[in-house]
Amino acid sequence: MRIAGLQKMTLLDYPGKVACTVFLQGCNFRCPFCHNRDLLDHDGPYSVDEEEFWAFLRKRQGLLDGVCVTGGEPTVQKSLPDFLKKIKALGYSVKLDTNGFRPDVLEQVVSDGLVDYVAMDIKNSPARYAETAGLPHLDLTCIEKSISFLTSNKVDYEFRTTVVEEFHDEQAFVEIAQWLQKVSENTPKAYFIQQFTQRDSVLQEGLSTPEAEKLARFLDIAAPFVHRAEIRGVEL
C-alpha cells in the first residue's frame, strides 16, 4: 500500500470518534481546489513505511477508536480491501473518504464489512461536475451509482461539498439538491457544506474563500432535500 502520510490523532475527521487519518497516494481526479496535490500522482513520494503504520496501530489499540482512510482517492488502490481488512482485524472502526467514482470498490468494501462510515464528496451540480473535478469530461453514471448505493442505507455515511467562490453559486446548489433527490434510493441522511480555504498546497492558485453568509444561503437551499444539513467548521 502506498501511504503518503499519517495524522496520528484527530477529533474532527471521524464523527464521534477519536481517530487517526491515513493518506493514500494517487487520485483519479484533479480538483483545482485540492489541498493534497502531492498525493495526486500514483507514483508520488509516499513517505510512510507500511510496517511502521501497522506498528503504530498496534501501539494505539485501546487509545484510538477508528481510522480514517483518505487520499488522494483510496478506491484506486488495488490492495484497499486487504488494507481495510487488516485495520478491522486490529479492532478499529473504519471511515472511508471517497469521490464516488469507483462504486464497484465502494460496494465491495461495504458488503464485506470493512467500512463503518463513508464520506463521499459531491463536487458540484451535474453541469459543472467535470470542471470542478478538474477533468475535461466525466461520466456521472459512476457517481450516481455511488449515491444510490449509499442512500440504500447499507452503511452509515455523509455527503459533503467543499464550496469555492469560483465554482459554486445558488443555482449550483439548487441543481445539486434536485440531483440528489433524483438519484437517491432514500432521502440522504447527512449533507455537509464545507468552506474552501486557500493554502500554498492547493493545486490551482487564485481561488477564493466564499463568505459565511453565502454558505448559509446554500444551506437553506439544500436542507429541505436531506434529513440533516449543516455547515462544517464555520461559525456563522
Image (cartoon, grey):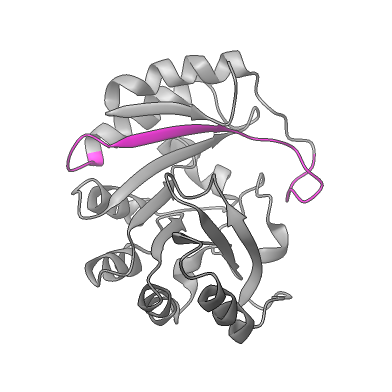
204 part of magenta stretch: yes
Left or right of residue 190, residue 20 in this image: right
Which quarter shows the N terminus? bottom right
Question: Magenta part of the protein: which range?
Answer: 183-205
Residue 176: say if magenta.
Answer: no
Q: Looking at the rendering, which quadrant does residue 175 occupy?
A: top left
Q: Could you tell me residue 135's position as x and y percent?
A: 57, 53
Q: Which residue is drawn at 60% across and 20% down?
A: 235
**Which residue is painted at 54% across and 21% down in the image?**
215
* Residue lying at 35% horizontally and 22% vertically, measured from the top left: 223
Left or right: where 45 falls relative to 171: right
* Quadrant assignment for the C terminus: top right
Instruction: Give the quarter of the image for residue 26.
Output: bottom right
Is residue 181 positioned above or below 136 on the image? above
**Looking at the image, residue 54 lies above or below residue 123:** below
Residue ranking furthest to the right = 200
Examine the rendered structure and indicate whether residue 41 appears above or below residue 170. below
| Farthest-out residue, bottom | 51
